[in-house]
Image (cartoon, rainbow, N blue to C red):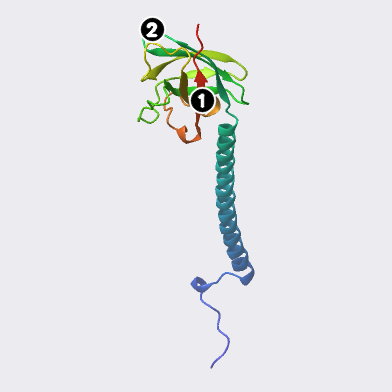
Amino acid sequence: MRGYSKPARGKCGISPVLSAAVISAIILAAGMAVYSIFITASSTWALEYHREIDRSVAKYQLALSVDYVKPLPDGNVKIWVRNYGETAAVILDAYAHLPETAPSSGHKITMNITIPVGSVRDVIVPCYGCGDELNGKDLIIRIFALPERLYNPAKPETYAQFGQYFVLKIRVLEA
């Protein structure tokens, strides 16, 4: 006779409500993980973009001028550098030359002189091709500076792309 038979004990299934709840929890957890990863990555990208813009702005806040040049007996010149910009500057390289004797070398990181906003510092720089008598002659002064907030003393070349060259022409006055 065929009739209703009771299922065996080891073959019980999960109820449809409980399986839907477990699958929903798994999908929700996966969605939260993906959302968390996306939010973290986009925050990191936004912060890096903000820092890049800040570095670029800092470059254009630099403003240096040379107020005075004094020849020294050892072939160097002493220059008075004024910072009239909106950020403190760190001079990494500076040199002078006559207009007709420009050196062919690029900038090197040879200095570490900080000039606060609104102040004047005297800096001794080499003068390439300069003779003994400079009175009344024009000199070209080249200064490579970096905003102080971007300067890393351990690795000064880290943000060198945000530095700025200042090329100034000044006449040496008789003392």
Q: Which disc, if any, is residue 73?
A: 2
Seen at 37% across and 11% down, the residue is 132
Vertical arrangement, residue 46 with respect to residue 145, above or below: below
Q: Residue placed at 58% from the left, 49% from the top?
A: 42
- Above or below — where is 31 with respect to 8? above
Going by the numbered disc 2, the residue's amino acid type is Pro
Q: Is residue 94 left or right of residue 12?
A: left
Q: What is the x, y in percent for residue 120? A: 57, 14
Residue 154 position within the rendered picture, expressed as x and y whole percent measured from the top left: 42, 24
Sequence-wise, the earlier of marks 2 and 1 is 2
Q: Nearer the viewer, residue 164 or 51?
A: 164
Please indicate whether residue 143 sits to the left or right of residue 75 in the image.
right
Residue 161 in the image, given as x and y percentages of width and height: 47, 36
Q: Report crowding for label 1: few under 14, some 14 to 19, many 20 or more residues within 10 A (C-alpha).
A: some
Q: Which residue was labeled with disc 1? A: 168
Q: Helix, strand, or loop for circle 2?
A: loop
69 horizontally vs 102: left or right: right
Instruction: Specify the farthest residue to the bottom.
Output: 1
What residue appears at the point 39 percent right and 18 percent down from the top-left corner? 127
Towards the viewer: 64 or 55: 64
Residue 159 is tagged as: none
In terms of image quadrants, where is residue 111? top left
Tell me the quarter of the picture where residue 92 sits. top left
Image coordinates of residue 80 in percent, x first then y, are: 53, 14
